[in-house]
Amino acid sequence: MAQSSTNLNKVVPPERVVVLNGSINFRDLGGYANSHGQKIAWRKIYRAASLGGLTASDRHLLGDLDIVHDIDLRSPSEQQSYPDQTWTGAELISNPLYPPTNFGRIMSNHRVRKLFNWRHEIPNLENPIARIYQNVVLSSHSQQAFAKTFQILLDQHDNEATVFHCAAGKDRTGMTAALILMALEVPDDVIIQDYLLTNDLYNYSDKREPPTNDKIQQAVAQMNTHEGEALYIEGVLKTINEGYGGISEYWQHALQLSKSDLQKFRQKFLIDKQK
């Protein structure tokens, strides 16, 4: 009989990485500390790469963790070509982050200049990939997809969890994770570290060596969060902070979610560090 998540919480301490046989880069967003002496609750929000290769034991584990929402951020064609292997009790939710039309405009990495509220201006980003990320954050289609993910999390019951994923668990998943961590007031450097962990997890996968929490912490300690690929997600943070005046403004004006929703989101997923 599958072990309940209550027993898992009592017997097995939570870890950043959930080791699966048929997928990599499946990890918990819990445990990160924010700037107000709180931390994100464990076993509530997960991010992942493709879930098309899950084994029977993987699916049992995800069911035991009470993951009831599987949000697929991939395109419809990706979803059809390599569908998720779902598990008992989980609802598969199609939520493509990239727009189905005018996608070339997002990928053209053009410079964006736009005014908001007559006070804030979208920053120019030098890195071409960072500009693509910026275009996603500014896309009305993508904003609706981000909002849908947030709404699912807002409606999640206390004894439930959600996973969101794309193909590699880096770009679409990384941007979504960044917005979630921003909403929970996690510092920028920590958000960048979470984004960069994908690279290390793929390296561990090549070695067929499941990473421990200690190994993850060692990898984080060696990261340079201000160069290379860090610039991609840093551009997202800069666009929201400078272009919109912060995550609260982006939450309301881009995602069309209310201030009370943001307060509810923080109350739902943040706990005191001592707990």
Image: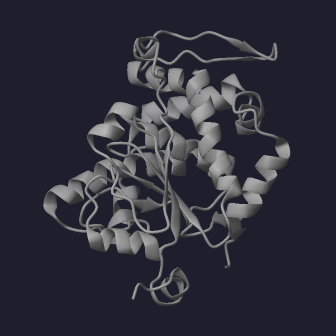
Q: Quadrant of the N terminus?
A: bottom left
Q: Quadrant of residue 54?
A: bottom left
Q: Quadrant of the C terminus?
A: bottom right
15 w.r.t. 110: above or below: below
21 w.r.t. 139: above or below: below
Residue drawn at x 56%, y 70% as measured from the top left:
42
Residue drawn at x 44%, y 37% as measured from the top left:
172
Residue drawn at x 47%, y 9% as measured from the top left:
110
In this rendering, would 106 be left or right of 188?
A: left
Regarding residue 77, the answer to whether it shows in the image is yes
Q: Quadrant of residue 141?
A: top right
In this rendering, would 158 be left or right of 209?
A: right
Q: Nearer the viewer, residue 252 or 234?
A: 252
Regarding residue 223, the answer to whether it shows in the image is no
Residue drawn at x 25%, y 66% as measured from the top left:
55
The image shows residue 93 at horizontal and vertical percentages of 51, 47
Judging from the image, the colouring scheme is one colour
In this rendering, would 232 be left or right of 55?
A: right
Q: Quadrant of residue 231?
A: top left
